[in-house]
Amino acid sequence: MSDPTQPLDGDPAARVLVAGASGFAGALAARLVWTHPRLELVAATARAEAGTRLDRLYPRHRVPLTLTELEPSAEEGWDAAIVAYPHGASAPVVAALRERGVKVVDLSADFRLRDLDTYRSWYGEPGAPDLLPEAVYGLPELYRDRIAEAGLVANPGCYPTAAVLALAPLAAAGLIEDVVIDAKSGVSGAGRGGGDRLSFVTVDENFTPYGTDGHRHEPEIAQELAALGGPAELTFVPHLLPLDQGELVSCYVRPSREVAEDELGELYRERFADEPFVELAEEAPGVRDVRDTNVCRIHVIERGGRVIAFAAIDNLWKGAAGQAIQNLNVMLGLPEAEGLS
Amino acid sequence: MSDPTQPLDGDPAARVLVAGASGFAGALAARLVWTHPRLELVAATARAEAGTRLDRLYPRHRVPLTLTELEPSAEEGWDAAIVAYPHGASAPVVAALRERGVKVVDLSADFRLRDLDTYRSWYGEPGAPDLLPEAVYGLPELYRDRIAEAGLVANPGCYPTAAVLALAPLAAAGLIEDVVIDAKSGVSGAGRGGGDRLSFVTVDENFTPYGTDGHRHEPEIAQELAALGGPAELTFVPHLLPLDQGELVSCYVRPSREVAEDELGELYRERFADEPFVELAEEAPGVRDVRDTNVCRIHVIERGGRVIAFAAIDNLWKGAAGQAIQNLNVMLGLPEAEGLS
Amino acid sequence: MSDPTQPLDGDPAARVLVAGASGFAGALAARLVWTHPRLELVAATARAEAGTRLDRLYPRHRVPLTLTELEPSAEEGWDAAIVAYPHGASAPVVAALRERGVKVVDLSADFRLRDLDTYRSWYGEPGAPDLLPEAVYGLPELYRDRIAEAGLVANPGCYPTAAVLALAPLAAAGLIEDVVIDAKSGVSGAGRGGGDRLSFVTVDENFTPYGTDGHRHEPEIAQELAALGGPAELTFVPHLLPLDQGELVSCYVRPSREVAEDELGELYRERFADEPFVELAEEAPGVRDVRDTNVCRIHVIERGGRVIAFAAIDNLWKGAAGQAIQNLNVMLGLPEAEGLS
Amino acid sequence: MSDPTQPLDGDPAARVLVAGASGFAGALAARLVWTHPRLELVAATARAEAGTRLDRLYPRHRVPLTLTELEPSAEEGWDAAIVAYPHGASAPVVAALRERGVKVVDLSADFRLRDLDTYRSWYGEPGAPDLLPEAVYGLPELYRDRIAEAGLVANPGCYPTAAVLALAPLAAAGLIEDVVIDAKSGVSGAGRGGGDRLSFVTVDENFTPYGTDGHRHEPEIAQELAALGGPAELTFVPHLLPLDQGELVSCYVRPSREVAEDELGELYRERFADEPFVELAEEAPGVRDVRDTNVCRIHVIERGGRVIAFAAIDNLWKGAAGQAIQNLNVMLGLPEAEGLS
């Protein structure tokens, strides 16, 4: 039950469950619901840490709720849920919640890929294939109208969020012949429980490519670029940055025809003119510029016949929990930026 | 068996085993033996990672040996061993090695405390109490002659190394009425396997006191200060620094009588004049000044009647593996700094 | 002139100038005024960067104002000002603003020390000694009522904020016989323009004591402890942490009489029960717990007859700009936490 | 004059001057000469810091020499010199040294570009164009024989070192149709004197592309790839990493024909079989793997028709001072790795 001191403006627009609130993204989602003027956080659940106060686990988020165990079959009066479970573990929970009519934003990959064979080749057998047709890919800048109608939104991966936003105007204009996406993320993107691989001593003063034999975010980026009209083929290599929150993608496009920097500027300004969370920068963005914000900051240039698009996001905000709130706002008919600035 | 390419100057002075070479201190010890011109690294063992090449686990150390399992009862022709096992796990291994006449430097706490009751109250029942009388505390600046004769040397903890060196001249002169030791260490001091507590995301951009209800290095510091003539009572609080290797202690002494800065300088210069690994600095030391070295860098001042001594070490070198090599050099009659510069 | 898009709830309670908005604290102050629901940011000025947009200099603060040059003699319709000038440069600007009746929170040291001789011995000749009597030391937890009446508030230094809050209950109870304050701050506390001394390469993976021959925050701490009834004598040593924002003080008190941990808890809870920005933690605080917040997080223990109080703040928030807003709220009769959560 | 305690094995092979020893690369060069068993450091000079002891400026290097002012016209008995001056400032000093027959390794860009027009378009008018024909590009893995005969060696830039080594086998085999080089460097690569742009607060927890409108290392990489038979056209974008020493290049090659991973492995092993400072890794390298070493660690893969080569170096070692020593060893007929391991 929610602590009586949650600051709300009048009646809540929805009573919200955050499942998996002990992970980085789930905990931030819980905090964003907690401080959201129109959402009521009715429960924050966790599989391992049930019984612990969330503000003991994450003092900085200051959410004074005790984590509980999730019983999705119980009638709890939830209107909406943000599910931050690992891939595979999410599908059954989402299915149970959907059965009771709860609107769900799912942070796992379980409902992101529309092609079942592609899903299987990267993740194995899907847990709730029947729900795939109703799931909407939760990038509001691409699917705002469908998200507004959706009962289940598959929140995008952090790399796809940055890469697809960086490339959307080019893809939609059919301008991408070929693209290399060199991506770099802070450590929080990998979640908790990384052991020695993500220990301070391993990561500090280090910088390493990883997933070089194929990363699960690649088919997701390919799917969305293809949907826009762009190429289904691409090269994507992520690297691990020695910082906490922040992600930058550098996208090197061989364009299908010559394109001047002016035209690029026009293309991007037009596409993103009314987007509350996309910023077009006059200089290459740094990840600090967007830290602790839901902003995707983009800069695009032409150099020797190649087009280069940079995008920076905070992987926990626009790349996960912030975008989940943005999606929830759209689903509930609230102002899209409510609780996010 | 040692790889044939180990660079040695003529016949080795000793054939050395490093047990527990998969941890931070053990791995560095293996590297220091490997590059030591007079020591032959005949085996590097590990409990969990046996079968893995050490240069796969720690590319930067470039030791091309495969980790094996330790069988201390086997006759392997070891002359000496550095044991880098956790507290408690070390004693039986050390005992088995000592039975075969192997000279041992032990990096655990198992033989550091000379008083059994003190040991018990911090660590529980000792594993090899019979060996305690022969163990020499491995701070060469205090016990060089006894180390030269010893079969078993208990390598000091990192905090005691820095704190005792910082305070030794004052303690020996009976000048310490009361002392507060505010200590700060990089993360490698806590070893591997720390899980989320030592993950990058937890430690990065953070700084926290820990062990505030009593830290195991406190009785060790008290023991050595008392042995020098100083106080057995002290206040010691460690803090975790967001960096990899490096440790600084700030020691605030209420002196038993007024003492001028000149006298302090004299006292310290005299005590450490011939020490190869103690530097007296004209300014407060930074931990970067001693990174990847076996040096303890000290600065002492007087301020408003209080004496403040700062000491910086690299916790993995002078605070662990480097000091182990220094001890081994002394035990084997080699030049004390051999293989350490 | 303020950009029309500043988000305000109805009429502003005050039209506010931020002078010196190109420094770290000034820029944050400008942002906090900009996002404050009841304050209107009418001008952000800077000496060197006039003409530059503030969101170009600090993209993350997203204040779309162009920095201007300050003309304090001009009639600009300012009701209040936050002045973030260097020590010495501040006094004349503050004097000019006060002459026109502008309420001022000054972030420099120019009006913090009530004793002129003490001021002179640390800073030289004061620039506006006539204003000293009317200046109130801006620690609301100590001087809330006087701040509410004040025209000029001297915002405390970051170290004094943390140290005085950590020690206030003890000082007021006459319990401090003697105190050592070992303080550690992130780099932003030193401001811009530090050159190679504060370059990334110098600070990264480093940790260093500084100001060991006396730091300007020491007389400020002494003044406030004495005002509470505590000792005027203390030992204060700051250290530089390899992180951006965050500060921790570890205060080692020799109490004037024996005091149990229960009594301590009671003392602190009583003192800070109604404070919106003081948190009493069950564990030693980390600086991450308070990052980007105006919170001072305190933990106090007893150990072997000594009392140890830890306090963590964000040096730019509670240690500078956040506290300036808190003071401004009090001066203007607004809710004290308005615009700060 | 050299300090008498410099550790040397018998007579020095050369008496060496390091000019510009107050910068990061120059200071490391001085240390490497100082600890080199066959080189005598006869002088370390600096323009601004003359009179300061080098171990005061850089305690960690422990070179107990006082920096002097350079008088290149004086007869000082130097056999060789490492010049670590800024671009433009280097040429006249090098010319004066060459006139006296001193062998020079120059760390600036003044003699790296063989085409004068290319030089002019990036750097302006060359300072000593007459010397260009005799200058040899100091990448021993490409020009070992010519370096052995050279009087003047132009030490490569850090990015070109990593990129050219990563791509050399492909370029020499005519396999590069098109290449994107996404490069990331630690902050020390930018040298001292960066002001607020390279301050800790700016760089920490940040990651930013820079030089996106063209970086001076691009023509250098193009020149060397072309010399090998590769493309003169390429896309190169550097990014700034929040770490001190370390550099990684990720090179995305569209090959001129299909090429299997086996063939790649063969190609690279053959090319680098006997190279003392090139390591072929089984996994993508991290910059920590090469920190404080002269090693270039390379990993190459094939992915969906694209070839990706990663190379990691320490920008101050293999990317600057370490490579300078390697070159000097070759020029003097010493073992190439002497003083570098």
Image: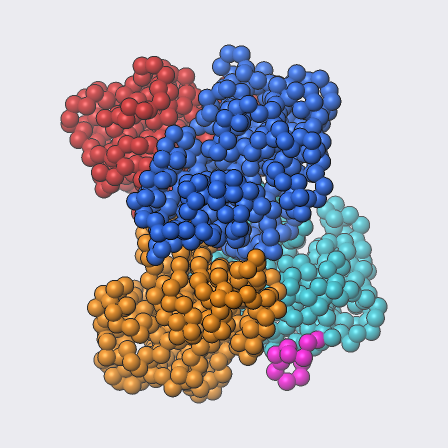
Chain colours: A orange, B red, C cyan, D blue
Q: Would you say B266 lies left or right of C14 here? A: left
Q: Is residue C4 magenta?
A: yes
Q: Does C106 sit left or right of B341 as displayed? A: right
Quarter-of-image position of residue B214: top left
Number of disc labels: 0
In this view, which residue lies farthest toward the top? D10
Observer-nearest of D70 and C50: D70
Please, is residue A115 above or below residue A14 in the view?
above
Q: Is residue B326 magenta?
A: no
Residue located at (39% from left, 34% from top): D272
Q: Main secondary structure of the magenta part?
A: loop
Outermost residue, left direction?
B74
Quadrant assignment, res A14:
bottom left
Give the x, y percent position of residue D103: 61, 23
Seen at 64% across and 77% down, the residue is C6
Question: Where's residue D16, x and y in %?
Answer: 60, 21
Does A307 sit above or below residue B255? below
> Can residue A100 be seen?
yes
Q: Is residue A97 visible?
A: no
The foreground one among D53 and C286 is D53
Q: Position of residue C292 (x, y in %)?
A: 53, 63
Which of the image's four quarters has the N terminus of chain C?
A: bottom right
What is the magenta range? C2-13
Q: Which residue appears at 31% of the width and 48% of the height?
A: D260
Residue C215 vs B15, above or below: the answer is below
Residue drawn at the location 73% of the way across and 20% of the way down: D74
Residue B133 placement (x, y as % from top left): 27, 24
The quarter of the displayed image where residue C160 is located: bottom right
